[in-house]
Image: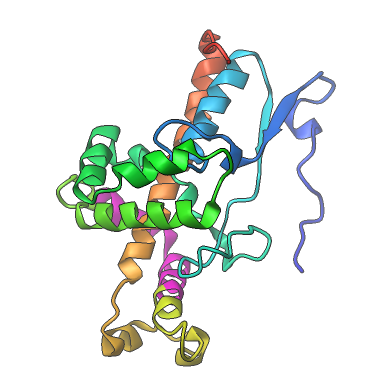
Amino acid sequence: AVAPPRWFGIDALGAGQRLWGVTAQTQSLRRHGDGGIGDLGGVIQLARIVAARGADALAISPLHAPFAAQPERFGPYAPSTRLLRNPALADPAAAFGAQHVAAVMKQCALDNEYAALERLALIEPARAAMAKMKLFSALHESLDAAGLRGEFDAYCSRTGEVLFEHACFEALHQHFLSATPARSYCAIGQRPSGILARTGFMNSSWHMRAKWNFTCCCSGWPSAAAQARSERLAPPACA
C-alpha cells in the first residue's frame, strides 16, 4: 500500500476556526432525471444547499470505477481502478446539456425505464447502471452532433495513457468475460490497440468518453458551492 506521510486535516481548511460540514452517500442523493441512482448532479445540488448555509465541507462516498461489464459488482471498495471514477454516477447533462440528453433518451426509448427506476423505494444499482450505460452509449454516437469533439480530445490528451489503458481493459474485459481474462491478452506496458483491432471490438473510446462525462460533472460542483457561499443563495424548501 502507498500512503502520504500526512493526511489532509482540518487545519488545512482554517486553523483555529470553528468549521462544519456534512457527509452523504452519492447514490442516496436522488433527484428527478437521475435514473433511480443518485449522481453528481445531486452532489452539486447538495453543495449549493449546504454552502448557502455556510458549510465548510462536503464529504461524499467513494467514486472509484467499477467493472463496466459486470454492473452487479457495484461496491466501490473493490474497483477495477482507483485512478478513474464511476461513469454511472455522472450526470450526462453536465457535458451534453439537458435538452440534448432528453432528446437522445427519447430516441433510445429509455424514458419508461428511467421513470420506473426513479419510482422505486430502494436503489437497484446494477439495473440503474445498465440503463445509464445504454444512455451513454447513445450519447457516444452523438458526440460530434453535440459539438463536443474538441473538448473530448483535449480531455484525452490531458489524461493520457491511464485513461487509454483502462478503457482498453474495460473493452477487453467485456469481450472476453466468458472466456479468457482480459489481462492474458496484454503484457504490462504493451498497448493493446492491435489486439482490439484483431478481435473487432473497438469500444475503448466509448469508455473514455464515459470517464470524460464524469470529469465534466466534477468541474461543476466546486464552482456551484463557491457561488452559493459568496451569494448566500436561499436554499430550496426541503420536504
In which quadrant of the rendered image does the N terminus lie? bottom right
Q: Is residue 94 visible?
A: yes
Q: Residue placed at 51% from the left, 30% from the top?
A: 44
Q: Check the image and tell me how it is coloured.
A: rainbow
Query: What residue range appears in magenta?
Result: 150-170
In the image, is residue 167 part of the stretch drawn in magenta? yes
Q: How many marks?
A: 0
Q: Is residue 91 visible?
A: no
Q: Residue placed at 19% from the left, 45% from the top?
A: 146
Q: Residue furthest left?
A: 145
Judged by its main secondary structure, the magenta piece is helix
Say which of 27 and 163 sits in front.
27
Picture coordinates of residue 223, whole percent (x, y): 48, 28
Picture coordinates of residue 46, whole percent (x, y): 57, 26
Picture coordinates of residue 145, whole percent (x, y): 14, 48
In which quadrant of the rendered image does the C terminus lie? top right
45 above or below 67? above
Q: Residue placed at 81% from the left, 26% from the top?
A: 15
Picture coordinates of residue 156, whole percent (x, y): 36, 60
Q: Is residue 8 left or right of residue 141?
A: right
48 above or below 159? above
151 above or below 181? above
Q: Residue placed at 71% from the left, 28% from the top?
A: 22
Q: Residue furthest right?
A: 16
In the image, is residue 200 part of the stretch drawn in magenta? no
Say which of 45 and 219 sits in front.
45
Q: Is residue 145 left or right of residue 140?
A: left
* The quarter of the displayed image where residue 115 is located: top left
